[in-house]
Image (cartoon, coloured by chain):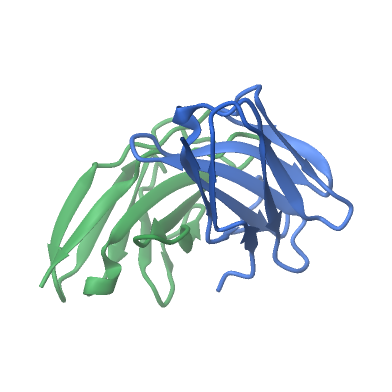
Amino acid sequence: DSGVTQTPKHLITATGQRVTLRCSPRSGDLSVYWYQQSLDQGLQFLIQYYNGEERAKGNILERFSAQQFPDLHSELNLSSLELGDSALYFCASSVEGFEVENEQFFGPGTRLTVL
Amino acid sequence: DAKTTQPNSMESNEEEPVHLPCNHSTISGTDYIHWYRQLPSQGPEYVIHGLTSNVNNRMASLAIAEDRKSSTLILHRATLRDAAVYYCILGGGYQKVTFGIGTKLQVIP
């Protein structure tokens, strides 16, 4: 158990809908990262927050947005969902940002299925 | 962004050493080299990291080339539980973290 929790574990929805994925980092970790893992594209970095502020942005679509709240939990919002958004979404946390040597601790992931 | 290159897949016999290579020719002086692995149906987990010197921990060893343009993750005795996808990534600076496809390691009994 990494100490990072993600809810829900599974999510099934329809195209055009909007969903929210939630992540609680390990106690004391200030950085939260979101990743998308689809079958053919490996693990893709989406976005990083550090202590409430956006720190780095990866291949995140404009239909997706995220935020980190004062209690340090984070939410990833996916809107106007398409079939291709079906994937595993992982959240990870670290003490500080990945610009130092801190390791990331990954949650168990949320499996999103868009029908 | 500094990128890494790894073989898509490798095989190893159980109880034999495994050397997983990673090329990172555009690494900058402040980039740490991190290795993670992802077991089936789980999130990635940290394996080891280093900057310039070779590193050992209970899971593996990391050998870093003198010019730091490549590194090798060494599993001293592969077990069936080591079958996973291994990712070599670079961390340092305010940059995107790229995991890529990784190397799928198959361990043969």
Is any atom of residue A81 visible in this view?
A: yes
Q: Residue at x 36, y 62 (%)?
A: B39
Between B52 and A85, the residue placed more toward the observer is: A85
Q: Position of residue B4 (x, y in %)?
A: 39, 37
Q: Colour of chain A?
A: blue
* Left or right of A95 in this view: A60: left
Image position of B90 with respect to A61: above or below: below
Q: Position of residue A7 (x, y in %)?
A: 64, 58
**Chain that is green in the image:** B
Q: Residue at x 28, y 48 (%)?
A: B103
Image position of A77 with respect to A23: above or below: above
Farthest right residue in view: A70
State the quadrant of the C terminus of chain B. Answer: bottom left
Q: Residue at x 75, y 69 (%)?
A: A27
Farthest top residue in view: A62
* Left or right of A18 in this view: B3: left
Image position of B71 with respect to B25: above or below: below
Is any atom of residue B31 visible in this view?
A: no
**Image quadrant of residue A35?**
top right
* Left or right of B62 in this view: A63: right
Q: Residue at x 57, y 29 (%)?
A: A81
**Image quadrant of residue B77?**
bottom left
Q: Position of residue A47 (x, y in %)?
A: 65, 37
Between B45 and A107, the residue placed more toward the observer is: A107
Between A95 and A7, the residue placed more toward the observer is: A7
Q: Position of residue B33 (x, y in %)?
A: 48, 49
Instruction: Tell how many labels.
Output: 0
